[in-house]
Structure formats: C-alpha cells, structure tokens
Image: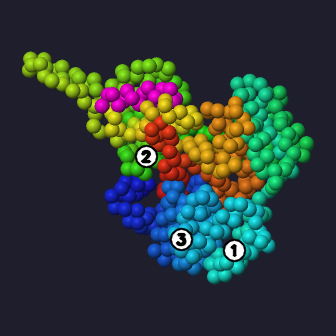
Amino acid sequence: MNLFKTILHASKTIGVITCICLLLTSCSNPSFKRPSGQLAPVNFGNQPQHVRELMLQRTVLLQEGKLYESARVGAQIDALITNPLAKEDNQQSIVETLTLLATQELETVKQSANRNMKGWIDLALILKLQPRAGTQSRTIGRWKNSNPRHSFNGPALSQFLEDRQITYKTPSKVAVFLPSRGAYASAAKTIRKGITTASYLLRKQWRPSITFYDTSAAPVEALYSHAVRDGAKAVIGPFDKTNVDRISRSGSLSIPVVALNETGGSSRHNLYQFSLSPEKEITQVASLAWTRGLKNVIVFAPDTRLGDRLSNHFITLWQQFGGNVLDSNKYTPKQADYSVPIKEILKLDESIQRHQTLKQKLRLDIKFEERRRKDIDFIFLIASPREARLIRPQFRFHRASDLVIYSTSKIYEGNENSANDRDLDGIQFCDMPSIIDKESGGANSHAELLKNWPDVHGTHQRLFSLGLDAYQVIPHLERLRNQYSARFNGHTGILSVDNQGHIARQLTCASFKKGSSYATGLAPQIQQLTPTFFD
C-alpha cells in the first residue's frame, strides 16, 4: 500500500493532526520525491513544525471543500509565519479562498468572526463585487482606514491588487467556434445561449465584439487562421472532441483557445481545455465516499459502452484509493424489472440455494427469509433518472434499504420533480452548483437567467452553464494558470487551471430528500492531493 493510501486509512482512526505529522515526516525524508502534478506543492520552507502542520491542514481543508475553515487556518498561519514570500502566498490564499464563498455566507460567518478575520472577510466581499479593484479605489481606501493594523494592509496588498489588475485581461474581440449542423448542433445552440447571456451580464466591465464561426462549414484550423486575421484575441470552442484534438495538434496558438472538450494530448501554450467530463465528476463522487469512511463497494451500471467506460473508471480509481470493489454487474437499460441483476450482485441467489440445500438434507419445511451479503458499505450506481427511480426501490425490496447509493449528475434531470424523485431519496451525487442551487445569486441566479430561455431545460441546462463559464472565465485565465491559489467561482463549479491547461471544476454535492435535492457541501478533491504530497 502506498503512502497516500496509508495516510487516508490512518485518518479514520488516529485523526487528521497525527496524519499531518506523518505526511510532514515523509515529505522531509530525503528519499521522498515530489512528482509533477496539477497543484503546486505546499512550500514548507524552514518553518517550525507546528506552522508546517497548519500549512498542510489548510491545504487539506481546501481540497475537502471546507473553504471557510481553510481560510481560518490560513489566518492562524499568518500570525505565526516569518518568511516574507511564504507569508505573502498564504495571505493571497486566504483572500482567494474567501472570495469563493457566497456573499450571504460571508456575511453570516462575519457575525461571529474576530476583528482580524472580519478584515479578511470585508476585503473578500469588496473583491467579489469589484474584481479589478485597485489600491486607489474608494472601497479599498475605506478598508485600509478601517483596518489600519491588519497584517495585509501594506505593500503586500498593493502588489496583490496590482497583479489582479494586470492578469485580468479583457480581449476586444472574441471568436466562437460552434457547429450549426450535425450531431452537435442542438448542444451548440444551447452553449451559444450561455455565451450570449454571459456577455450581457458582463457588459459593464467588458464588451467585446463576438463573432461566431461555423465548424460544420470549414476545417477548424482554417477557422482559427481566419479568426486571427479578423482580429480575434481569444477563442471559445470548438465543442466536439475531434476538432479539439485537431486544434491541439495544429501550429502554434497565438491567441488563447478555451476548448469546450478535452483530449489526452500534452499541454499547449494558449490552449485551455474545459469540459463536462463524466470521469472527472466520478473522481469527485468517489472522493466524497472515501472521505466518509466507506471502503467496500458494489458497482451497478448499464450494459452500454458509456456504462462500461464509466464503471471501469470508478473501479480503477476506487482501487487506487485503497478501497475494495466487491462485485460489479450490468443491467439492460429501458427495462421495468431489474431484479435479476440486483439479486445476483447482492448474492440473494446464493442465500436461496443454501436454503434449498439445507431443506433437502434435513427434509424439513424450514421457514426462510432471503438474506443479502453483509460486507457492502455502499452502492455506486450509474443510471438515468428514469432507471434510477426503478432501480432504487428494487434494491430496497431486495433487502438493501440500508445501503447508501452514490451516483453521478446523470441521475438528476436538473428540474424539481419531487413527486417522481421521492424514489431517489438518500442517493448522494455531485453536480454543478447552478443545478443544485438554482436560486443562489439573486438576479443572476441560474433560475432567473433561464427565464429568458424557456426552451433550455433538462441536461441542456448544464450546456448553458458551460457557455456561461467559458465566456466569463476568459479575463481570469492568466491568473488561474499562473497562481496556485487562484480560483474562479463559476456556474459549473469552482474553476482552477492545472499545469496542463485543463480547467478543473470543483462540484457541489447533494442528497435527495423528499424528492428534492439538497446541497451537502463542496466535493472533496482527494485526487488532486495525490500528486502534491505523495510519491
């Protein structure tokens, strides 16, 4: 078992702080190598042991989705740290983390915060409303006057604000590569609505000229050259994987491209790959189950190519975490009765067979109640809403009512349907925050924005959010790629950019209760911790 698995297992019994000490010991070992990964490693420097423990604790809390707790630990570190560069990095991380919280949540935690923490929160509230606020802005001036002794009130704040202004780039012309015909035309139409809506929302800060280019009418390489000649300074698209692969293999990219899918190719300068990858979603669902102390799983997936692909990804990942995949089984979609594969995976047939054998040997009419296997911690289910509404009750009927089910966003239509979704009660899944909490954001909430597009519903809501974020993230690309702690609070999730130019989404997790989905917190990101701390 590798170090990562050992630490995770140990955390269940000996506690987080002890595990942090184990990590620190390992990281200080001369033979320990840090592989290159998505996230920059924590810079322990020459800090005292207790400071290094807090630094790692802060990072772990951040990856677990506990944003305010991470920021509070960061504030503790700020009072103890002495290295100027490490102190500045930590201070920037505190602000970046707090700006990811909703305004209402910041106002709530502010009420019980101490004076120092209130200063951090007030600064975050300013930057949420004015992302380009500079040292000369009135709101920043008022913050400085109200917090004269705050540790961030000085040259470090001025440099931080200046860097944010420099890296906030608003191109004057944006090209959009989407098809008007073919298999992806309908999806492209919805993405276009998201882009159009985003341009309206940001019209006061950024009003570029937007030109749409048809990828179903010309090769994507030719469209890119055409867009550059037309004066485009950034590109959104293409959407289909084939064209993303082609543009990633083309010549040098002189202007940034936010591709709406991803390939397995190596990183390219100016190429950002932004997708709704179901595999990455599964990684976060698996992380959620693991951090809740679950280990033994059975996998139930449709007998389709996609079902095979996703179930295999989960199985591989769960085994890498150190979990046990007890069994997996397939079901035929669009059926009404799934009892045969359910009984097989629960080993109810073995229970029945044992009864028959015993009955024959004893020649007695023995009372019998079938029993499922008892070594299962949870079920990982891949299913559409229709299938899940049938499968969940059948698992209950077959003696598995006490088993929690984890699933993907595929299980949720994205629309409130409490009458039909009561059968999904208790199922855990992760999805876009805009889908889980449509009312958050007031006038700019997902629910309000979709009132202008009544034909956007079901799974197309996620494509609409993809279009929104693909446009809104453009001014932040340089900051996200170059600053380890930088994040962007989007409709599709909390966005970050890794070393390969992939735009990662930290999702919101939810559970069904009385037919409605309720947010349970941010998805933990165990997979991102692996390359940061472990060999």
Distance of mark 1 from mark 2, alpha carbons?
Answer: 41 Å
Q: Is residue 170 left or right of residue 485?
A: right
Taking depth in this image into account, of 2 and 82 the one nearest to the observer is 82
Which secondary structure is most common in the magenta stretch? helix
Kindly identify which residue carries mark 2.
Answer: 289
Q: Position of residue 384 (x, y in %)?
A: 52, 29
Of the numbered discs 2 and 3, the one sitting upstream in the chain is: 3
Quadrant housing residue 105: bottom right
- Residue 261, percent from left and from top: 67, 38
Residue 495, placed above or below residue 356: below
> On screen, 158 above or below 233?
below
- Per the rendered image, the range of residues in magenta is 383-399
Residue 420 on the magenta span:
no
Q: CA distance from mark 2 to mark 3?
A: 31 Å
Q: Position of residue 383 (x, y in %)?
A: 49, 30
Q: Is residue 99 visible?
A: yes
Tag 3, which secondary structure?
Answer: loop
| Residue located 65% across and 36% down the image | 461
Residue 265 vs residue 456, the one in the foreground: 456
Classify residue 345 as left or right of residue 140: left
Task: Give the residue number, with chain letter if any, for mark 1.
Answer: 143
Q: Which numbered disc covers residue 113?
A: 3
